[in-house]
Structures are given as C-alpha cells and as structure tokens.
C-alpha cells in the first residue's frame, strides 16, 4: 500500500469517525433538551405550584391569581394539594379521554356561559386563575384545567397542544350538559392557543357547535417555529437540533407538529376570534402573528397589539388594557 493511499484512508476514517461522533453527540443533546423541556420526569414537575418563583412577574401573576380564586370561593390550599371538592360554587372534576385522566375545576359565577382557560407549557390550572378576572367581569363562569401531564392530569410526554383538542371537546360537553352553559368559549395562552385553534376547527366541534369563539394570547404559526425561537434565545444551534427534537416528539407521542400547525388550521375557523399579541414577544414573533391573523377565516376577528409585555406576560404588563380588550370584545359581540 502506497504512503499516499494510507494517508487518504486515515483521513477518511478520521472524517467518518468525526461525523458519526458529532451526530451521536447532537442526538444526545437533542434528547437532553427534549427531556428537559417536554417530558414530565417526576410528579413534582409541572405540578400545582408557581412554575418560575424566581421570576418576579410570574410570581406576581401567581399570587394575584390565588387572591382572585379565594375571593371567588376556591379553597386554594386544598386545590394545591390535589384534594377534590364539590362545595359552594366550586366543583373539582375528573374525566377520562384518549387514555388520559384529566382534572379541571369549575367555578360557577352565576352566568349562562363559560370559558375554558387553556394554559401553556409548564402550567397547572392554578396558573389560569390569573386570566379569569376579565371573564368574570364579562359575565362568564370559569373552567380551569390541568392539561395532559400537568398538575394532577396523567401523562409523561407533552403533546404540545396537539391531540388535546379532543380533551377540549370533552370539557365543553360537560360545561353544557352537566352545568347548563349555553355557550363555551376558549382562552388559549401560547401552546393553549394552538389547542384552541385545533379544537374549534375540529369537525366534531363544528358539527355540534360546541365552541362559540376564542381569545388567543401569543399564538404561534407552528410549534416548530416557536421552539426554534426558544433555541435561539437559549443560544443553542438550530440545526440539526430543531429537527431532532421534533423527531423526539413524534417518536414518543405520535404527534406531527407540522401537520397540526395552527397556520394550517386557522383558515377553517367559523367562530369569532380575538388575538392578543405583544410587539416584544420573542417566541411568537409579530410578523408571524400577522400571518396567522391574515389567514384566519373567522367572520368576526380582531387583533390587539400590546407595546409592553413578554411572551405570556401581556396581562401583567398592562392589566387595564388587557382586560379592557377582552371586556370590550364581548361587549361588542353582545350588542350585535
């Protein structure tokens, strides 16, 4: 064997080894990212507690939500411990859907319509108390829910809002059939907005006219796009990490994030839609929100921009403007 050929073989072997090693390393990194962001590794993860107590805004949202819930009749201490009650105007509910045990809490405020508040990733139903305040003023009963693998609800893998549209259908039927609500609305935050769009565009929901409309805070065009922005913000390499994490999602849940992307379903909506968006949102970026709004097929739609507030933190940045946007929206609809 000539010296040149030997050198070529050695160089080729080193390159192949390097490529394989790099690929295996990135697979490991993708697995770690997936485990750290989208897998419930213990019951304490995504439980009924403030998800970011070190974040002053998040903690303030949590505390204000608890104060509202106590005034509304909720035993927040029992709720945090997972003690189910049916007392006064508050009813804890357990349902089964698609193989999951799901928990919710219904707060009857004396009205004939209700809103399901769908939180984003990492949040339990107690987080949703904070967003209930404008709905009380607008004349709504409240259903807060533990989404799959959050709070008391079962599950290990986060379905990123996909497939959970069937959960919303089950909740809506309970609100109408058991509690007598004539209308059911959806309020989705971040990933919860994804779920709301899929739920209202679901053929069964449309056939039965289950949902009267929705309010979406910080919706994204697709979870892939949203997660890409998270990777950028965390100074992680987008390629090949993004594709690998999306593959991990599909491998563990069967979810195809691209097929179920909100941008592919928002043109199937036939109910009123209010979108609340932040000009400083790093993860549901403004130009993508404009695309969603333009493609939205709703007969009655409105997009309200907020100058301040980060992703999922619009209300804490300006509670008066946030609540006014929702209350005025329903006032306009009620007066038509």
Image (cartoon, rainbow, N blue to C red):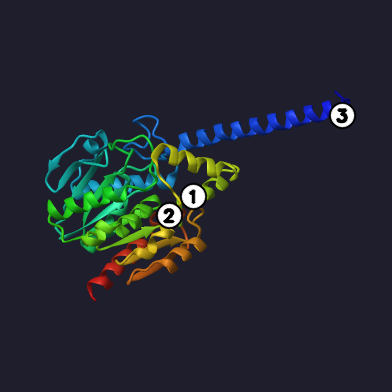
In the figure, residue 6 lies in which quadrant? top right
Q: Secondary structure at mark 1?
A: helix
Q: Secondary structure at mark 2?
A: loop
Q: Residue at x 44, y 41 (%)?
A: 250
Disc 1 residue crowd, few under 14, some 14–19, many 20+, Cα 10 Å:
some
In the rendered view, tell whether residue 327 sits above or below residue 98.
Answer: below
- Which of discs 3 and 1 lies nearer the camera? The answer is 3
Tell me whether circle 1 and circle 2 mark residues in contact (CB < 8 Å): yes
For marks 3 and 2, the one nearer the N-term is: 3
Q: In the displayed image of the protein, which residue is found farthest to the top? A: 1
Location of mark 2 (residue): 261
Q: CA distance from mark 3 to mark 1?
A: 47 Å
In the rendered view, tell whether residue 241 sits above or below residue 212.
Answer: above
Location of mark 3 (residue): 4
Residue 224, numbered label: 1
Tell me whether circle 3 and circle 1 mark residues in contact (CB < 8 Å): no
Disc 3 residue crowd, few under 14, some 14–19, many 20+, Cα 10 Å:
few
**Relative image position of residue 263 (x, y in whole percent):** 43, 60
């Amino acid at each position: 064997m000539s010296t040149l050929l030997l050198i070529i073989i050695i160089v080729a072997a080193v390159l192949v080894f390097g490529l394989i090693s790099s690929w295996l390393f990135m697979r490991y990194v993708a697995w770690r990212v997936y485990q750290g962001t989208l897998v419930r590794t213990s019951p304490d993860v995504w439980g009924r507690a403030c998800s970011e107590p070190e974040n002053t805004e998040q903690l303030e949202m949590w505390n204000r939500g608890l104060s509202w819930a106590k005034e509304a009749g909720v035993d927040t201490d029992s709720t945090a411990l997972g003690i189910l009650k049916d007392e006064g105007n508050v009813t804890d509910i357990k349902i089964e859907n698609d193989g999951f045990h799901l928990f919710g809490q219904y707060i009857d405020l004396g009205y004939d319509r209700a809103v399901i508040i769908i939180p984003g990733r990492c949040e339990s139903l107690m987080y949703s108390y904070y967003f209930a305040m404008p709905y009380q003023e607008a004349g709504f009963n409240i259903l807060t829910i533990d989404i799959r693998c959050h709070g008391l609800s079962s599950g290990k893998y986060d379905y990123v809002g996909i497939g959970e549209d069937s959960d919303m259908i089950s909740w809506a039927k309970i609100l109408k059939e058991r509690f007598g609500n004539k209308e059911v609305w959806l309020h989705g935050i971040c990933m919860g907005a994804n779920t709301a769009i899929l739920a209202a565009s679901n053929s069964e929901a449309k056939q039965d006219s289950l949902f009267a409309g929705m309010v979406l805070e910080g919706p994204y065009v697709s979870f892939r796009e949203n997660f890409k922005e998270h990777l950028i913000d965390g100074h992680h390499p987008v390629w090949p990490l993004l594709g690998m994490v999306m593959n991990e999602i599909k491998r563990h849940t069967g979810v195809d994030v691209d097929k179920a992307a909100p941008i592919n379903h928002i043109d199937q909506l036939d109910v009123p839609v209010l979108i609340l968006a932040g000009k400083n949102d790093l993860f549901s970026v403004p130009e993508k929100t404009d695309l969603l709004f333009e493609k939205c097929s709703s007969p009655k739609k409105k997009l309200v921009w907020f100058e301040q507030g980060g992703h999922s933190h619009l209300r804490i940045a300006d509670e008066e403007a946030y609540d006014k946007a929702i209350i005025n929206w329903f006032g306009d609809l009620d007066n038509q």
